[in-house]
Image (cartoon, coloured by chain):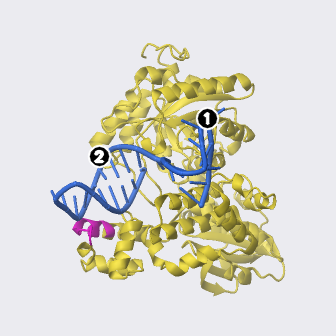
Chain colours: A yellow, B blue
Amino acid sequence: MTNLELSWALAEMGDLLELKGEEPFKVRAYQRAARALEHLEEEAASLYARGELERIPGVGKNLAKKIAELLETGRSTFLEQLRQEVPPGLRDMLAVPGLGAKSVRVIHQHLGITTLEELERAARERRIRQLPGMGSKTELAILRGLDMLKENRDRIPLGIARPLAQLFCRQLSALPGVAKVEVAGSLRRGCSMVGDVDLVVGVKGPTEVKEVMARHPQVKEVLLEEENRLSLRTWAGVKVEIFLVPEDKFAPAWLYLTGSPAHREELGRFAAERHLSLEKLGLPRRLEEAEASFRSEEEFYSRLELPFIVPEWREGRGEVWAAREGRLPALITLKDIKGDLHIHTRYSDGLHTIREMVEAARARGYRYMAITEHSRSLAVARGLSAEQLLAQREEIARLNRELDDFVVLSGIEVDILPDGRLDLEDDILASLDIVIASIHSGFNQKEEQIMARLEAAMRHPWVDIIGHPTGRMLGRRPSYAVNLERLLELAAETGTILEINASPDRLDLDEDAARRAKEYGVLLAINTDAHDMGRLEDMWYGITVARRGWLGPEDLLNTRELDGVLKALKRNRGNGGKHSAPGQGNARP
DNA sequence: GCCGTTTTCGGCCCGACTGTTTTCAGTCG
């Protein structure tokens, strides 16, 4: 059993315990362990083999036993018992914004409701408002929340779809008769939200792919089965489409299934101009018509005298002609990234120490990183006071004296308070190497107020970067009332860098905003906002956003060497290009 | 249920916001 599956199991136990009314700290212990497993460097199975499960942060004797059972048997008697005790639909109800475990319990106990459908009916029939502690507003909030869920139904964030796809790919690759497995569809194109997980399986001879997948422990039901196609739904509600193709037809099928349809249309128009037809070049009109016409996508594109167009660009936004005319940006890859400028550690709400995060960053080949904890007002994240921040700066200075091939920048993710002030004094901000300013409160303010806060931050002499500029949480929370054009205008005017927050929960700025930013000449930084070592890997998601936004390495801050990064910061340009000396209280630009 | 540079018990993530309420409970970040 993989770490991911263990994590899912523990998270489900946590949810079910919470629905049972267990004490919050116990529930949190399960959730914390689930998170730790999700991003563990090493497979839990090998830790188990060495008897070291309890080295996982948040895993003690009890959880180690439960994990061991899952690893040994693939099952958990505890989880199965919980599933018996708590109706499964209650867990779905937790996903309704505004509904927590307490309310779900009240609703279940009084009305016997166990599904989202029953919940909606009860709300429409005004039966929720009669329950203790609930009123008409709660009832309306539930209906609104259900609407939002429906909108997002069958839409999964990339960050959930991708690990699941990788898991299935690995397992399918190991089956006899399978030559090759790849992801296709919107997931391969790197869309932030995807409808389903499309997998293309190239087969050579008899295979049991369909049989194995139909009884896979992650699979809840088989939606459709055809000779060369299997459609599934997982327990987590993700739709998975598996397409079986003969090995020699793999490339055309993969190209076809990757899409997008708009890209295929654009290719068609481009081909027509040249009196060619896509079918004759080997791209089928329907999957069933795929022939063994080319062996790689590169080969197909070259038949059209085009350079290879990466999946992230295949959206029918003019990429074909741009490719032809050499107007596509240089392809950015993970190798272009020289450092990560938004990192949390145990000082605030991160999981690992500065040293551990540094080691993880060095292992990725980075040259630098910025430690940017939350500031004081974000108490939930144990935000740092000025004193704690200065102590941390000392530790960073000591570490830097030790390191000869890596630099740790001392920074902060300072809160932009509801009134537009920053959460730390100017002289503190001035003494740091880099300052990210972010909004974490007052999400419901009107556009005027939100923009006034962002403007104040961007005009602030010591704010270098605006973190997750729109505040959206994918599939969970819309952005606050940002006027994007005005934001970009201000960023350009003030020389403030905007973040592409690479956390798959956010992807903020998104690809469209990133593309607009480039037009405004605004510099962008891809930051992971990592709270543990494993999540440094989220850089991949940020790269995907950048590619889809047609950004090249030159449009980004952290593709530069450290010297170039420092020179691009507002604080080091406003005063004649001199780097600010820590603690000197530099003159304002 | 986890954890420990004062602890093997008693903390642990706190405060704003909202709605349902006459003083607070639940949710969320």
Q: Which mark, residue A558? A: 1
Residue A559 is a magenta residue:
no
The image quadrant that residue B24 belongs to is bottom left
The local secondary structure at tag 1 comes to helix
Look at 56% across and 40% down and name the residue there: A344
Residue annotated with mark 2: A445
How many numbered badges does the structure rendering display?
Answer: 2
Look at 55% across and 59% down and name the residue there: A31
The image quadrant that residue A394 belongs to is top right
Q: Amino acid at mark 2?
A: Gln
The local secondary structure at tag 2 comes to loop
- Whether pointer 1 and pointer 2 mark residues with C-beta atoms closer than 8 Å, the reply is no
**Which residue occupies the foreground of this view, B21 or A318?**
B21
Q: Is residue A30 left or right of residue A148?
A: right
List x then y, in percent, for residue A483. Answer: 35, 44
Tell me where the magenta segment starts and ends, as one range: A132-142
**Which residue occupies the foreground of this view, A574 or A292?**
A574
